[in-house]
Amino acid sequence: QVQLVESGGGLVQAGGSLRLSCAASGSIFSINVMGWYRQAPGKQRELVALITSGGSINYTNSVKGRFTVSRDNAKNTVYLQMNSLKPEDTANYYCHVRNVRAEIYWGKGTLVTVSS
């Protein structure tokens, strides 16, 4: 059993900040990639940010300069610091974990709502 426990979502005004966390536990064989996707109402799920075990990072263009992804390998935890939030950042944010066997796990999602 693999569990991904997300926390940190909520309601914030435009320009504000939130920090998401996702802790992975259970029978996860060597984690390679950790990160976040998001899905807004009526839209497809999209990549937000990914970080590899070696520290390589990939952001979607719309969050560059505003969001920062980081991880604590000892705790199997990934974070997403979100600054200068915009109403268009409103979505369910899903934790994403991929191990060296290319097995993928998803969290249940945490809702981020940015009011204008």
Image: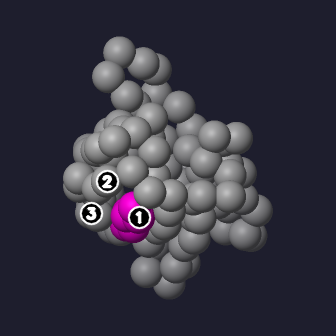
Q: Looking at the picture, does residue 32 appear above or below residue 114?
A: below
Residue furthest to the bottom in view is 74
Q: Report the magenta residues as a range.
A: 16-22
**Crowd class of label 1 (few under 14; some 14 to 19; many from 20; radius 10 Å):** some
Residue 42's place in the image compared with 97, above or below, is above
Mark-to-mark CA distance, 1 and 3: 14 Å
Q: Secondary structure at mark 1?
A: loop
Quadrant of residue 8 within the rendered picture = bottom left
Q: Which residue is mark 1?
A: 17
Identify residue type, mark 2.
Gln
Q: Secondary structure at mark 2?
A: strand
Q: Quadrant of the C terminus?
A: top left
Q: Which residue is mark 3?
A: 7
* Residue closest to the eye, 40 or 65: 65
Image point (51%, 58%), residue name: 84
- Asked if the magenta segment contains residue 21, the reply would be yes
Q: CA distance from mark 1 to mark 2?
A: 8 Å
Precedes in sequence: disc 2 or disc 3? 3
The answer to whether 77 is drawn above or below residue 59 in the figure is below
Residue type, label 3: Ser
Q: Which residue is mark 2?
A: 13
Look at discs 2 and 3 and give the one toward the viewer: 2
Pointer 2 and pointer 3: residues touching (CB < 8 Å)? no
Front: mark 1 or 3: 1
Colouring? one colour
Task: Name the mark nearer the viewer: 1 or 2.
Answer: 2
Residue 17 x/y as whole percent:
41, 64
